[in-house]
Each structure stands twice: as structure tokens, then as C-alpha cells.
């Protein structure tokens, strides 16, 4: 099983998943700094990307004098794995347990409740 992504790594991964093309470290840095209001430097982002390569989430290919990074794991598969982990952790392995845990700790607006109802109805 792959190691989990840290919160910082996940922010970078989200930028890579959104891109249709492999990204350079400078492109990943610029997108992440803009989207998440970070002030990360190239060396910081490069360190995170190297860790993500070692963890098996990314691969890199040389293009001229730079390296481009592309995902080896899809956003959907990572999201499913993360959601399964949260269901196991907070819902004792059951989705309704996770939802019950969520509703005990979160007050939803009527608008949010309606959106959730529409999503559930659309599953039929």
C-alpha cells in the first residue's frame, strides 16, 4: 500500500491532476502558490515532488533541460482510497456511521441539506 500524501503534497497533486499535460516544477509552484496563496520556493516544491515520486504517485520525464511531472495515480482512485479511510476511521467501516459522525459535529444550512438530498436522489 502506498504511503499517504501529506497536506502539502496533496495541494501539489491537485494542481497536477487538473493539468492535461505534464508540468514542470516551476509550473506546479506557480499554480499552487496562486491557487492556495502559498509562497513556496522552487526548492520546497521540488522536495515535495521528489517525495511524491518515491511514494509512487508521480513520475517524471526529462524534456530538454527540465523535468516534467505527471500522475501515476488518478484523482478518483486517491479520493476513493481517502474516503474509504475516513469511513473506516470515523464511521467504523460504514458510510452511514461516517455521516452520523459528520452530522453530530456539523450544523448544515437548509440549502446544504437540499443539495445533499438532490445528490442522493440523483443516485437512483
Image (cartoon, rainbow, N blue to C red):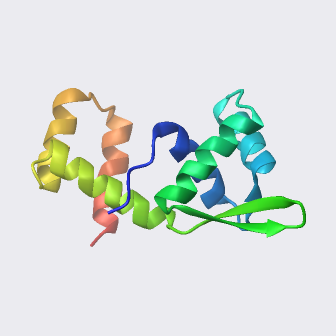
Query: The N terminus is located in which quarter?
Result: bottom left
Q: Is residue 99 above or below residue 71?
A: above
- At x 41%, y 66%, the residue is 77
* Front residue of 91 and 117: 91
In this rendering, is residue 80 above or below 12? below
Q: Nearer the viewer, residue 80 or 2?
A: 2
Q: Picture coordinates of residue 99 (x, y %)?
A: 19, 45
Residue 109 sits in which quadrant? top left
x 73%, y 65%: residue: 22
Identify the residue shown where x is 18% and y is 45%: 89
Outermost residue to the bottom: 124
Q: Which quadrant holds residue 104?
A: top left
Count of numbered circles in the view: 0
Please state, as top left, top right, bottom left or bottom right, where the C terminus lies in the image. Answer: bottom left
In-front residue for pair 64/121: 64
Residue in front for this viewpoint, 62 or 75: 62
What is the x, y in percent for residue 38? 67, 29
Residue 118, image x, y percentages: 34, 56
Residue 108 is situated, as x and y percent measured from the top left of the image, at 30, 32
For the point 69% across and 44% down, the residue is: 46
Q: Is residue 18 above or below residue 42?
A: below
Amino acid at each position: 500500500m502506498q504511503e499517504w500524501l501529506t497536506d502539502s503534497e496533496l495541494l501539489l497533486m491537485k494542481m497536477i491532476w487538473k493539468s492535461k499535460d505534464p508540468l514542470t516544477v516551476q509550473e506546479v509552484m506557480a499554480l499552487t502558490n496562486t491557487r492556495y496563496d502559498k509562497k513556496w520556493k522552487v526548492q520546497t516544491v521540488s522536495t515535495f515532488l521528489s517525495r511524491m515520486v518515491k511514494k509512487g504517485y508521480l513520475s517524471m520525464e526529462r524534456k530538454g533541460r527540465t523535468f516534467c511531472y505527471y500522475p501515476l495515480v488518478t484523482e478518483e482512485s486517491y479520493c476513493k482510497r481517502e474516503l474509504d479511510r475516513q469511513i473506516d476511521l470515523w464511521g467504523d467501516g460504514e458510510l452511514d456511521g461516517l455521516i452520523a459522525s459528520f452530522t453530530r459535529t456539523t450544523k448544515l444550512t437548509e440549502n446544504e441539506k437540499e443539495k445533499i438530498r438532490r445528490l442522493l436522489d440523483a443516485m437512483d
